[in-house]
Each structure stands twice: as C-alpha cells, then as structure tokens.
Image (spheres, helix red, strand yellow):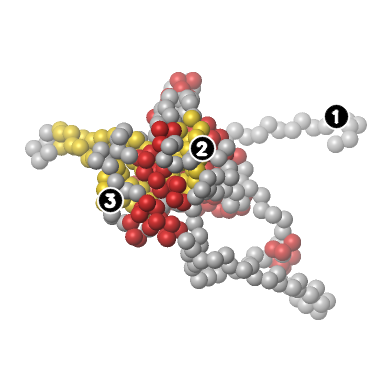
Amino acid sequence: MGSPLAFRPAVKSEAKLRLALSGPSGSGKTFTALTVGSRLGKRVAVIDTEHGSASKYADLWPFDVLELTPPYSPDRYREAMAAAAGYDVLIVDSLSHAWAGEGGLLERVDEIAKRSKSASSFAAWREGTPEQHRLIGALLAAPMHLIATMRSKQEYVVDRDGEGRTRVRKLGLAPVQRDGVEYEFDLFAEMDLENTLTVQKSRCPALQGRVIRRPGAEVAAELQAWLVGAPAVTPAPTPEPKPAPRERDVRWPQDFAQPAAESAPQAEGPTGPQLERIADLLLFSESQPKAKRVTDGLRRGLADAAAGRLSKGAAGALIGRAKASLEPLGWRPEPEVPPAAEEPPEPGSRG
C-alpha cells in the first residue's frame, strides 16, 4: 500500500526568479532586465532576438549573448535555453518572437493548416499548442533566474453602445504572446515610453501594485530579499526495514494484490499519447470560461512533465479527472484507431 497523504508545515524555500517585462520599443525593457539580472548573479546569459540590441549595453554590464535568428520556433528557443546551462541568470529578449516572429508559433500553425486536407486552424492548433506548452514548461523549470521581455500591442474590444450601435474601444496594452502567458511568472510588469514600470501581478508583496520611475538596483534588492528562503532541510533518517511477518500474521487480500511501496521501481514518466491527450484536453479547456481550474491543473501537469516530476500514473489520473470535468461541457475525444491484429505464428516456428 502507498504511504498515506499527510500535510506538513509550509516552508518558504530559496527560489529562482521568474520575471516578465512588457512594453513598446524604447520603454527600457532590455536595460531593466540587465539591471536586475546583473544583481541576481555573476554569470548572465542573454538570448537576443532584437538584432543585437542587448550588446549595446555591454560596456555597462558583463554578460554573454546568443543572437537567435529565424526561424523563431518555440523548440529553437528551448534549444537556446539548454545552451545556457551553468549560468546564474538567463534573459530572453524577447519572448514575443516565439509567438509572432518569423517562424514563430502563429506562422507554424498556419503552415500546419495549409498542409492538412481540411485546412482547419483548430486542428492545426492541436499540433501547435503542445509546442507552446513545452516552451512555457522549459521557462518555468529553468534552473536559474529567468527574465523575459515581451513587446506590447494595443488591445481593442468590439461591443455595442446603449443604442445598439457597434463601437470599438481601446483596452490598453497587452503583451505580444499567447493570452494569459504573463500569469505564469512570479512578477509581471509593464513599461511605458517614459521608462516607468508598473507592476501588474506580483508574488513579491513588497512590489505588488508599485509604480517605479526608471527602475534600477532598488528593485533588484527587493527581489533578492524576497527570493531568500529557509535553509535546506536535513532529510529524515531512512527508516529501518520492517521485520518479516510471522506465520501467524494475517494480511488482507489487497495486501497480496498490491506490492509494498518500498519495493516499487522508480516511477515511469508519462507516455507520448498521454502528453498528447493532456494537450488535447488543455486546448479544449482554454476555450471554456467555466474550466479555469481544470486549465490551471493541466498546465501544471505539462510543466511537471517538462521538469521530470510527472509519473505515468499521475498523468493517467490527471487525464481522468480532466475528462470527468470537461465531458459535461461538451468535450469528446477523437476515435482511436485500433491496433492491427498480430498475425499468428507459422506452424513450427518458436514464438
């Protein structure tokens, strides 16, 4: 039998920063990212898709740069991030190209749709969405401080006024990336052309809602203080093995049916079809306003899979819970193609 579930006292552990900065060209995103990043670690790496703009600050801070060129696919971003292993800080400048740049996900989905017989963009997103989730999973699982910049765009909404006439209203600026990506970060801030930083979302209480003119070392200092956690907890001693049951001991039948947890092999990771099913469920749940909790759970599952923390069994349980929640909302799986039957062995052959 598996060990029973149990609560434990919550402990704030030392963490790596996940910061996103959004703003128009010239708002100071790259400068601010380098200002904060240079205070968080000695070795700083920059993935530059902005035609060498980061290197213009090389006389102010020491850092290494990888100038990423098209195609800007999410998988190429992940390759660049893997090349940053060993650095203390990674700055992605900018993350917008993975979405709307040459060879980015929007172009990838268009190409997939054109190649398909149905030319359906919905079907194309079934292939493109997992690429986006793998990228977000890699960002969240990076073993270093991570700062991502994003370009911003004017966002509009079309509605009707009190007399029923159609009108177009400005909602403000939004990052050029998939909707909701800013909520994956610890802190998301917008910058304007006066180099003013406005914190829109923060897990750091000291910075929540702050408006800071030309942010500098003071922001980095507050983030450093917040990221510090409790010292590593000494692992508990390994329990002594239990004595073998005596002959007169009686065990319930289920004890024979399920091996002891101590003898179980290391959990196997999720299979490819499981990951595809999770991505399929996530694609549907993102279109359902009432399924936000299911969407959050599926996103965490993909992030855990990217970090190697999701087992095959846990993936199956996640799929089962999501299906039970989404089927009343109209989700239906595509029919699976049955596997081909095996041919019987020839007479005389050794099978």
Residue plotted at (12% across, 38% down): 161
Q: Say what amino acid the circle numbered 2 marks.
A: Asp
Q: Closer to the N terminus: mark 3 or mark 2?
A: 2
Visible in this render: residue 260?
Answer: yes
On the rendered image, what quadrant is the N terminus found in?
A: bottom right
- For label 3, the residue is 212
- For label 2, the residue is 64
Visible in this render: residue 322?
Answer: no
- For label 1, the residue is 346
Give x and y (percent) for residue 256: 74, 65
Give x and y (percent) for residue 127: 50, 32
In three-dimensional space, the C-alpha distance between marks 3 and 2, rounded to whole angstroms, equals 28 Å
Q: Say what amino acid the circle numbered 1 marks.
A: Glu
In three-dimensional space, the C-alpha distance between marks 1 and 2, rounded to whole angstroms, equals 63 Å
Mark 3 vs mark 1: give the one in front.
3
In the image, 294 versus 199, the foreground residue is 199
On the rendered image, what quadrant is the C terminus found in?
A: top right
What secondary structure is found at the residue carrying circle 2?
strand
Work out which residue is located at the far front of the displayed protein and give it.
59
Q: Say what amino acid the circle numbered 3 marks.
A: Ile
